[in-house]
Amino acid sequence: MSLSNEPIIVANDLTISYELHRERKKLTALQDINLEVKAGEFVVLVGPSGCGKTSFINAISGLVPKETGSVTVRGEEVTGPGPDRAMVFQDYALLPWRTVESNVRMPFEFQDLGVSEAEKKKRVQECLELVDLNGFEKSFPYELSGGMKQRVGIARALITHPDILLADEPFAAIDAMTREAMQAEMERIVMETGQTCVFITHSIDEAILLGDRVVVISYRPGKVKEIVDINFPRPRMSNSEVKTSREYAEIRDHIWKLVKDEASQTNRGE
Ligand SMILES: Nc1ncnc2c1ncn2[C@@H]1O[C@H](COP(=O)(O)OP(=O)(O)OP(=O)(O)O)[C@@H](O)[C@H]1O
Ligand SMILES: [Mg+2]
């Protein structure tokens, strides 16, 4: 996939704080984050628990207000959610009483995008095909495995044809074997659709296999500690030489040390 040089997402000195009413204090989750994500780029965020990764993608999706600085998408300040940005959640967030088809169509109920009924039906089919779930339209979530549920979550995220896919540890609840298959699926979908992806994970292997760049966030308040470029050719998931290469081991070791350093801060108390 060729990357455009135009940044699609720009965080400029972004600071996010939360008011802790009970303790009557303010918690700064992220401080002065500067990051540009190019159109078509796959950026992975890693960092210790509580460093502000979820807060950052929530700010891009418009679910969390910034304190100072800005987040812009295609040059426009983010002020709330929009169909150009879709989220894939860790716990799938499917409605159990609805069929697969009805879950996938859900985003159309929240916003009038001027899409005809025929087009909606066509997109449901296309998106289910993309995640390899055709034939399961009438199934309910309880009839599906964890990996299948997450694929429904991905199909639902793709239904509005978003430019930007935001994923918050989407494969954390999935067993190791299925997780590998899901990573390959994610890589394929993003290569096919040309979407921009901001993806959070605690798995350094997942970060290296999926990311064009891995952004290591420091412990609270979260700042960009280092950005590591990953230049292995794609598709990487099906290429066993990537994971066994010396370069892979070096990058893995480097990122691991950066994250471990930060994680040790979390044990030093507030
Ligand atoms: N709605 C909220 N109200 C108050 N504090 C919050 C809120 N959301 C997050 N925080 C705090 O902000 C900090 C960053 O949280 P965030 O969820 O962004 O971290 P994270 O990097 O995603 O962590 P994890 O890896 O555990 O998911 C944490 O200290 C958390 O307690
Ligand atoms: Mg999180």
Image (spheres, rainbow, N blue to C red):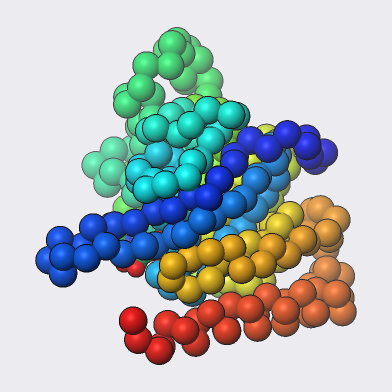
Q: Residue at x 78, y 37 (%)?
A: 5
Q: Nearer the viewer, residue 181 or 16?
A: 16
Image quarter where the C terminus lies is bottom left
Indicate whether 161 appears above or below 96: above
Q: Nearer the viewer, residue 67 or 162?
A: 67
Q: Residue at x 69, y 63 (%)?
A: 227
Q: In this image, 234 relative to 137: left or right?
A: right
Image x and y of residue 113, in percent: 43, 16
Q: Residue at x 32, y 24 (%)?
A: 109
Image x and y of residue 11, in percent: 55, 45
Image x and y of residue 228, in percent: 73, 65
Q: Quarter containing ligand 1?
A: bottom left
Q: Nearer the viewer, residue 147 or 63?
A: 63
Image quarter where the N terminus lies is top right
Q: Residue at x 49, y 41 (%)?
A: 70
Residue 171 visible, this orientation: no
Image x and y of residue 14, in percent: 49, 50
